[in-house]
Image (spheres, grey):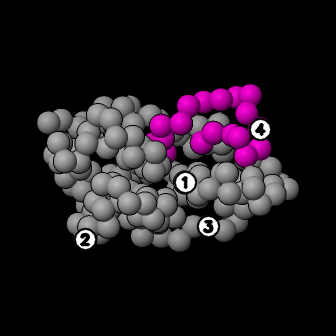
Amino acid sequence: MYLLDANSLITANATYYPIRRLPQFWDWLIVQGNAGVVKIPNEIADEITAGSDGVSDWLKGADAKAALRLNEAVDIGLLRRVVNEGYGPDLNDAEMAKIGKDPFLVAYGWAKLGRTVVTKETHAASKIRANRKVPNVCEDFGVRWITPFAFYEEADFRL
């Protein structure tokens, strides 16, 4: 199962797969979601739907919502470990705001074997605390991560 980061959808819409011009891509995501191939954790989906762009409107739609939202609760113990060990045990409020919902994405990826996080973020080994990137934290916990284009290749997206 692939777990999508918000940035993978927002960037796709803003650059190479605009919803209004390539609805086939967005329909394909719904098909993949219905098949259980791709999901969006609720916390990540909530970040997206809080916006006011095309991706937000699309994900609020009944088809996308039913197909793509991950229907499970986060394991709080795993989430705490991701925050404490992946970012820092004593993050202040500003740092917690900066990391946002990223720890949820990593925790869901870590919760079950065979999950892969899809993110537009890039590896940045020198970053510390709230500046750490999703790929670095994924690697800390043995969670596989790939870029959106690697996901499209692996999941065989075609027009």
- Mark 1: amino acid: Leu
Quarter of the view holding residue 150: top left
Residue on which disc 4 sits: 128
Q: Image height check: is 71 above or below 113?
A: below
Please say if the residues under marks 3 and 1 sit with CB atoms less than 8 Å apart.
no
The answer to if 118 sits in the magenta stretch is yes
Mark pair 4, 1: CA separation: 18 Å
Q: Main secondary structure of the magenta part?
A: loop
Q: Which residue is mark 1?
A: 105
Of the numbered discs 3 and 1, the one sitting upstream in the chain is: 3
Residue range in magenta is: 115-134
At a point 47% along the width and 37% down the height, the residue shown is 120
Image coordinates of residue 22 in percent, x first then y, are 18, 42
Residue that label 2 marks = 62
- Decide which of tag 4 and tag 1 comes sooner along the chain: 1
For disc 3, the neighbor class at 10 Å (few under 14, some 14 to 19, many from 20) is few
Q: CA distance from mark 2 to mark 3?
A: 26 Å
Residue of label 3: 75
Report crowding for label 2: few under 14, some 14 to 19, many 20 or more residues within 10 A (C-alpha). Answer: few
Cα separation between marks 2 and 1:
22 Å
Mark 2 vs mark 3: give the one in front.
Answer: 2
Q: Are marks 3 and 4 in contact (CB under 8 Å)?
A: no
Q: Residue furthest front?
A: 52
